[in-house]
Image (tube, helix red, strand yellow):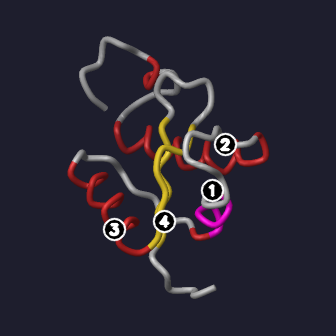
Amino acid sequence: MNRYRKQAVALAYGNNPTPVVIAKGDEELAERILQEARDHGVLVAQDPQLLQLLSKLEVDQEIPPELYTAVAVVLSWVYWLKGMRPGDEKRTDQASW
């Protein structure tokens, strides 16, 4: 495996009970995923170990329980940066996070 290959995995949580893989890809597709995130103000975390584990999942697959803690760390970082609290992602009265 090329250690320098560009990869990306996008997760959605929102109204899902568990975060779900909504996109993943290598090289050009990874760059398009990252550009879409930037274009929509989505924060991007870089965690090579978590990326490696998440990239094994299929699109539309919920993250498995063994990744809950690692993903929760990323989500807590996002919440902190956006001034959110756990549960805010489930609120329907917010126009956009």
Question: How many marks do you count on the picture?
Answer: 4
Label 3 SS: helix
Q: Which quadrant of the figure contains the N terminus?
A: bottom right
For the residues marked 1 and 2, what is the alpha-carbon distance in whole angstroms? 8 Å
Label 1 SS: helix
For residue 80, above or below residue 96: below
Verify CB contact (< 8 Å) between mark 4 and mark 2: no
At x 54% / y 49%, what residue is drawn? 74
For the residues marked 4 and 3, what is the alpha-carbon distance in whole angstroms? 14 Å
Q: Residues within 10 Å of mark 1 (few under 14, many from 20)?
A: many
Callout 3 amino acid: Glu
Name the residue tied to disc 2: 63
Q: Which residues are magenta?
A: 49-53
Verify whether residue 12 appears in magenta: no
Q: Nearer the viewer, mark 1 or mark 4?
A: 1
Counting from the top left corner in percent of width and height, residue 63 is at: 66, 42
For the residues marked 1 and 4, what is the alpha-carbon distance in whole angstroms? 12 Å
Name the residue tied to disc 3: 31
Q: Residues within 10 Å of mark 2 (few under 14, many from 20)?
A: some
For the residues marked 1 and 3, what is the alpha-carbon distance in whole angstroms? 17 Å
Q: Which quadrant of the figure contains the C terminus?
A: top left
Q: Residues within 10 Å of mark 3 (few under 14, many from 20)?
A: some
Q: Which mark is residue 46?
A: 4
For the residues marked 2 and 3, what is the alpha-carbon distance in whole angstroms? 22 Å
For residue 47, above or below residue 23: below
> Is 86 on the left-hand or right-hand side of 34?
right
First along the sequence among labels 4 and 2: 4
Callout 4 amino acid: Gln
First along the sequence among labels 2 and 3: 3
Verify whether residue 52 appears in magenta: yes
Please identify the residue farthest to the top as the structure is shown: 93
